[in-house]
Amino acid sequence: MSDRVILYDTTLRDGTQREGLVVSLADKIKIARRLDEFGMAYIEGGWPGSNPKDVDFFAAARSIAWKNAKLAAFGSTRHRSNRAETDPNLVAIVAAGTPVVTIFGKSWLLHVRDVLGATPEENLAMVADSVAFPAAAGREMVYDAEHYFDGYKDDPAYALATLRAARDAGASTLVLCDTNGGTLTDQLVEIVRATSAALAADGGPEVVWGIHCHNDSELAVANSLAAVANGVRHVQGTINGYGERCGNANLVSILADLELKSKYEPVPAGRLGELTEMARYVAEIVNIAPDDHQPYVGRSAFAHKGGVHGSATARASSAYQHVDPGVVGNVMRLVVSELGGKANTQLRAEQLGQQLDGVDPKALSLVIKQLEAEGLAFEGAEASFELLVKRHKAAYARPFTLCDYTVLVEQRGGAELLAEATVKVEVAGEVLHTAADGNGPVNALDSALRKALGAFYPQLDSVHLVDYKVRILDSEEATGAQTRVIIDSSNGVLEWSTMGSGTNIIAASCQALCDSLEYAIWKTGAEVRRRDERHFTTVAPGNGAAGAARPRRAD
């Protein structure tokens, strides 16, 4: 039995069966290249017999020099009415030109009779012919025994017969698939042991045993690791657990578990530190927001919100962390919230580059608890937290004061909706009163603020809104509910998030907008423009509910 565990990635095939996940040809090539660079041993590129995109992918892949991975083409056993050498699916698989071919076949008599409409004997012949055809063309053969565990529970002798047919036809790897994801770990281990023992007793060719688990019982990772502990050396899965229904086994977690908690090294040495970046890269390419709570690589995987946890972790990093986050390329975070204490507040401030000189962390944490009780939440708005720290320092002076504001929304006679905001701000002892239109009340308010402050701080010209989110905190209050607004902003170099809260969405938005602009002034080191250099500008309306900064033009 080999001590090496081989990871077989099927993100580009099984992973794309996740609802809402769509990738282009260019996306597939990018992901495959990144997985290869990371050190993945096998990459399943798709099913060339099923769609033109996969045919094009394999054609493009021929011109790529793969560094670590073997590329696999995937497909099914032949149709029961076809010969293998004329079956369109098998012909397309061989034509893909990959060094590895993976064929899946039926292990469960329910599928043989009711899905394929074949006899048990016909299915065995289909398995053997479909494996033998690519094997004769010199391909390394992997056989995926679909629904193997359900098939074994139904008829062990027949499930084993399908494996023997594949092995004897030239499959060097036999993969046991928990396709419905419903097998509990103890039973899976029992079947893995019985299966390998039964085929070993035959005295036939030696094979590598594989496992392919789905996550419908939340056991895909656990079952994959249990299979490894019982002799399996080929593990299939997807990055971030993407896949149909509840997903496939998450190779990110499996990889880290094997490397950090066992004797196995499934990827080349030194690559584990890239794990977080790689997982998020794939998420970015497939346009799915990374799961903040994903083990090892999630933003919250090593985040500590509770005061006891934060304090203990500050003294001993392993107190509430099972591994050093740095080994997988992640970082430890202390979350500032009403549940945290002074340790969370102080350490999170220091992580953000803010020393609490002259600020009592205990007093500050009490302020945070009160503010969060009123609806604020610093977890998703760290710029507002930095400003809170800054404002508690004796030497800090706010760069501007919003004295008052008015927002009007008007629609008459079915005409287009009009929104207008007026603001009065004070900067360096001067008071400026400005007005601006917008395509919504928040956009109008944002435009008026920028119009006023831009005269004093031209650096704000580069600031624009990236996202605007509203959350209702107590929906049972209906239109009188407490509302939390979070604004994401950027100046092309930095990105930051600020928040506001209140029963009035305009007031909450104004609070978040003012924090965003104050943060931008502070972080860019902007100084008030001299009186003789000032000129006033107007801002064009934005194109969304919160609006967007537009290039300014002189009045």
Image (spheres, grey):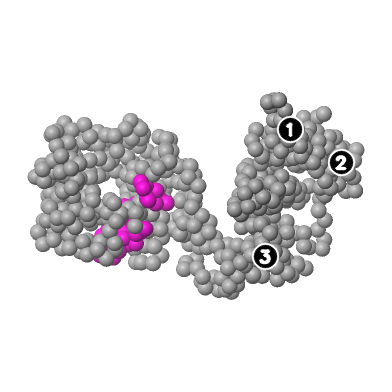
Task: State if disc 1 and disc 2 touch (CB < 8 Å).
Answer: no
The spot of residue 143 in percent (x, y) is 21, 48
The residue that disc 3 covers is: 369
Q: Residue at x 82, y 49 (%)?
A: 401
How busy is the neighbourhood of tag 2: few (under 14 within 10 Å), some, or many (20 plus)? some
> Range of the magenta residues?
218-247
Residue closest to the eye, 118 or 283? 118
Q: Quadrant of the C terminus?
A: top right
The spot of residue 222 in percent (x, y) is 34, 62
* Label number found at residue 410: 1
Residue closest to the eye, 150 or 275? 150
The residue type indicated by label 3 comes to Lys
Q: CA distance from mark 2 to mark 3?
A: 35 Å
Q: Is residue 324 above or below residue 176?
A: below
Report if residue 162 lies within the magenta region.
Answer: no
The residue that disc 2 covers is: 432
Q: CA distance from mark 3 to mark 1?
A: 39 Å
Q: Residue at x 21, y 36 (%)?
A: 90
How busy is the neighbourhood of tag 1: few (under 14 within 10 Å), some, or many (20 plus)? few
